[in-house]
Image (cartoon, rainbow, N blue to C red):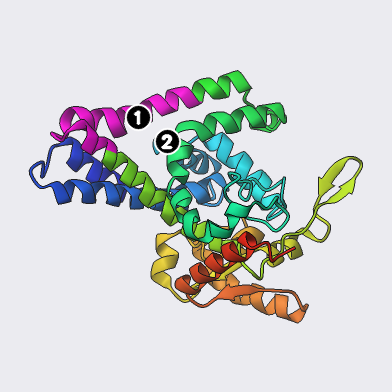
Amino acid sequence: MVIVYFLPWAMIVSNIGAGHLPLFWLCWVVMGCGIVGIGTCIMHDANHGAYSANRKVNVFLGYILELIGGYSVNWKIQHNLLHHTYTNIDGLDEDIDSIVLLRLSPRQQWYWFHRYQHLYAWFFYMCMTLFWMTAKDYLQVIRFGRRNLLVKQKVSLSKAILRITWYKMFYYGYVLVLPLLFSGQPWYFVLAGFVIMHFTAGLTLACIFQPSHIMPHASFPEPAQEGGKRHIKESWAIHELATSTNFAPRSRWLTWCIGGLNFQIEHHLFTNICHIHYRKLSPIVKKTAADFGLPYHEKRTFWGALVDHARMLKLLGKNQLA
């Protein structure tokens, strides 16, 4: 996956195929696929502490997110802490707290323009990593700092902002400045290639993660209130079964490409286990859920999951779910 990302970058910077424009565009598209592969197959497991039994290896590989423009502290808070603890709970799970143009939960405010979100959502999905690499990390770390969520990560807000700035400077230095200087292409082609890379990565990642939770059969529970704090009402494991969906469980190729995230249920239940074991865990979890009369949501194909997600966007847009 690292080669998939850096080989086309090296070809661009080395001015290989400068006179062959389709190859230039293809390199950026392949780099977008490399971002997806690095994120799902390496960074995701590493920052869950599941890539290796050696903690130092996980910490080292977790920093690969900084190499592709992100900030691992933010990711751990949003994903490990908020998403995995409060899956599909509006106001707590930041994965469903998107821009106002997207309504990803029946508990969110409905506006008339949401009627068309099943058509335009895909464009905003494409912009996901582009927004992440520019403004999101700064906005998010400030928000996390105000909520005292940086404390457990042992970093102050000022230090986090400084680190993000250094990481972004390094990222834009090699991914934009070097191609601008050495690719032999006009600056506007390089900028267009950069956008194409992120459109590829953003749309692909959204098509992996959104059908895992934003589905017609998924639960979107209200949190319980106790002592001024919000928490999930039922058993955490049952909550994860009700809010997560597997897809294409028989596709070994897809499982390899996206780091086993098509086995979203197993991932949510066993975050500290490497994704290469999800396939064997799946039938055990499925049988146990059936034994106890619990839900186990699964779509046979990736395409079927995407279609169901699109249908969910349409239902949410029509305000037909409550």
Is 178 a magenta residue?
yes
Q: Which residue is mark 2?
A: 69
Q: Is residue 285 left or right of residue 191?
A: right
Marks 1 and 2: CB-CB under 8 Å?
yes
Distance (Cα) linking label 1 and label 2: 8 Å
- Amino acid type shown at disc 1: Tyr
- Residue at image location 43% in from the left, 27% down from the top: 167
Q: Which residue is mark 1?
A: 172
Residue 218 spot, x, y in % from top left: 67, 66
Counting residues from the N terminus, which is met first, the one under dot 1 or under dot 2?
Answer: 2
Q: Is residue 254 left or right of residue 243?
A: left
- Amino acid type shown at disc 2: Gly
Which structural element holds mark 1? helix
List the single residue furthest toward the front.
Answer: 112
* Residues in magenta, as a range: 164-191
List the single residue furthest toward the left.
Answer: 19
